[in-house]
């Protein structure tokens, strides 16, 4: 019964999101690192391994002198002991989203209202709240992991043959460097 309820919830949430994506036009723009000021990273923070991997990408942007705002989703009612917010990394959990996965906290709405040069959703689980935040957050260029539902949200999709957050971070850095090198000229 709970599985059926979750499937219905997912169908309704995705329907509402798809309606909104079709009615909103956004033009993507790639900004070279030398001119970039802000980047946003979204990820599923339920495991401590994911947090360690995200810190590698965080350091990559910080070395480029780009302010980074990282937001991790904890798929529980409360954060665990290793979900301690830092200067660059914040977390949110199920208590900060509504039944359908839409943000209801000021922290999430504030995050989404900032205009970023890059937004990267590093969630391989395709969590609806992260997908929705990716959509509503203002960003010049959006990157996500490929799945058949999200083509209209992102400007660049990473196809993952190896399903690990470490590999995803490596691939993201590699492709960001390639994109930057082509756009610096």
Image: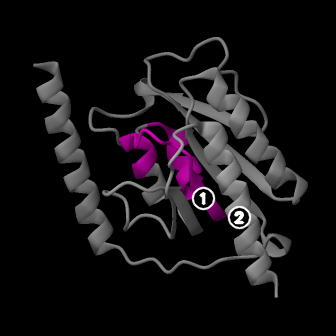
**59 sits left or right of 70 in the view:** right
Q: Nearer the viewer, residue 101 or 145?
A: 145
SS of the residue at dot 2? helix
Q: Quadrant of the N terminus?
A: top left
Write the start and end of the magenta stretch as one range: 105-132
Q: Which residue is under mark 1? A: 119
Q: Which corner quadrant holds the C terminus?
A: bottom right
Cβ–Cβ below 8 Å for labels 1 and 2?
A: no
- Secondary element at tag 1: strand
Name the residue carrying label 2. 176
- Residue 99 vs residue 25: left or right? left
Q: Position of residue 95 (x, y in %)?
A: 42, 24
Residue 29 lies in the magenta stretch = no
Above or below 9: residue 154: below
- Residue depicted at 80% across the width and 70% down the height: 33
Q: Residue furthest bottom?
A: 185
Give the residue displayed 55% in from the left and 64% down from the top. Answer: 142
Q: Position of residue 10 (x, y in %)?
A: 23, 40
């Amino acid at each position: 019964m709970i599985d059926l309820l979750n499937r219905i919830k997912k169908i309704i949430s995705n329907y509402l999101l798809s309606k909104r994506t079709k009615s909103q036009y956004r033009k993507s723009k790639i900004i070279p690192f030398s001119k970039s000021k802000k980047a946003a990273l979204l990820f599923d923070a339920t495991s401590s391994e994911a947090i360690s991997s995200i810190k590698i990408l965080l350091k990559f942007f910080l070395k480029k002198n780009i302010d980074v705002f990282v937001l991790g989703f904890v798929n529980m009612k409360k954060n665990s002991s290793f979900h301690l917010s830092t200067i660059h990394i914040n977390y949110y959990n199920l208590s900060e989203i509504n039944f359908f996965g839409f943000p209801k906290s000021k922290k999430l709405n504030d995050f989404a209202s900032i205009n970023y040069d890059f937004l990267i959703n590093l969630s391989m689980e395709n969590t609806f709240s992260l997908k929705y935040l990716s959509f509503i957050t203002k960003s010049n260029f959006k990157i996500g992991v490929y799945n058949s539902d999200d083509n209209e949200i992102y400007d660049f999709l990473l196809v993952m043959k190896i399903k690990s957050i470490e590999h995803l971070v490596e691939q993201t850095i590699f492709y960001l460097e390639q994109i930057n090198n082509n756009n610096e000229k």
